[in-house]
Amino acid sequence: MPPSIEQAYISGFQDECRSLWAQAGPSGKLWDADSLEDSPHTIDECLDALDPFNANSWSDYSVAEARAGGRSDADTAADGMTVANRFQTSSGLVVYIPEA
């Protein structure tokens, strides 16, 4: 697999995690909007879900498609932290996770 495909996948995944957690505000924490009593989630949880091996499934695609695949997989990882595909910030803002 060309290194650019793997890097595109990794960059897409990391960028999507950063995009979601950029909305967390100063606390850097997001809560499951439907389970606020649970512990909050951090960007590290999202980034730790990255498995570069998954980039292999994009080896026959373009760099742009691999990047989009990484973003989609990050959304799937974030969705796994919630009941209904949405987070809430400490200030009450609801952050919707894009459909993967």
Image (tube, grey):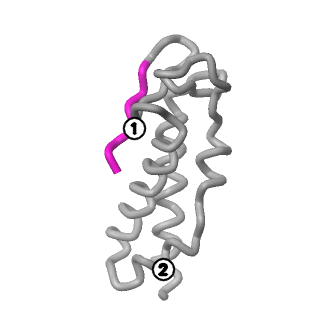
The residue under label 2 is which amino acid type?
Asn
Image x and y of residue 45, in percent: 65, 44
Image x and y of residue 36, in percent: 56, 18
In what element is the residue under mark 2?
helix
Q: Which mark is residue 18?
A: none
Along the polypeptide, which appears first: circle 1 or circle 2?
Answer: 2
User: Marks 1 and 2, Cα distance to the nearest angstrom?
Assistant: 24 Å
| Residue drawn 54% across the image and 35% down it | 21
| Residue drawn 53% across the image and 65% down it | 10
Badge 2: how crowded within 10 Å, few (<14), some, or many (20+)? some
In the image, farthest residue toward the bottom: 1
* 30 to 98, vertically: above or below: above
| Residue drawn 48% across the image and 52% down it | 74
Q: Nearer the viewer, residue 72 or 34?
A: 34
Count of labels shown? 2
* 99 to 32, vertically: above or below: below
| Residue drawn 53% across the image and 82% down it | 3
The residue under label 1 is which amino acid type?
Ile
Q: Is 96 included in the stretch rendered in magenta? A: yes
Image x and y of residue 62, in percent: 33, 77
Q: Nearer the viewer, residue 96 or 4?
A: 96
The residue at which mark 2 appears reads as: 56
Q: Is 89 included in the stretch rendered in magenta? A: no
Badge 1: how crowded within 10 Å, few (<14), some, or many (20+)? some
In what element is the residue under mark 1?
loop
Horizontal arrangement in the rendering, residue 91 relative to residue 76 (left or right): right
* 40 to 36, vertically: above or below: below
Q: Are marks 1 and 2 in contact (CB under 8 Å)?
A: no
Q: Which residues are magenta?
A: 94-100
The residue at which mark 1 appears reads as: 97
Image x and y of residue 63, in percent: 37, 74
Q: Nearer the viewer, residue 78 or 19?
A: 78
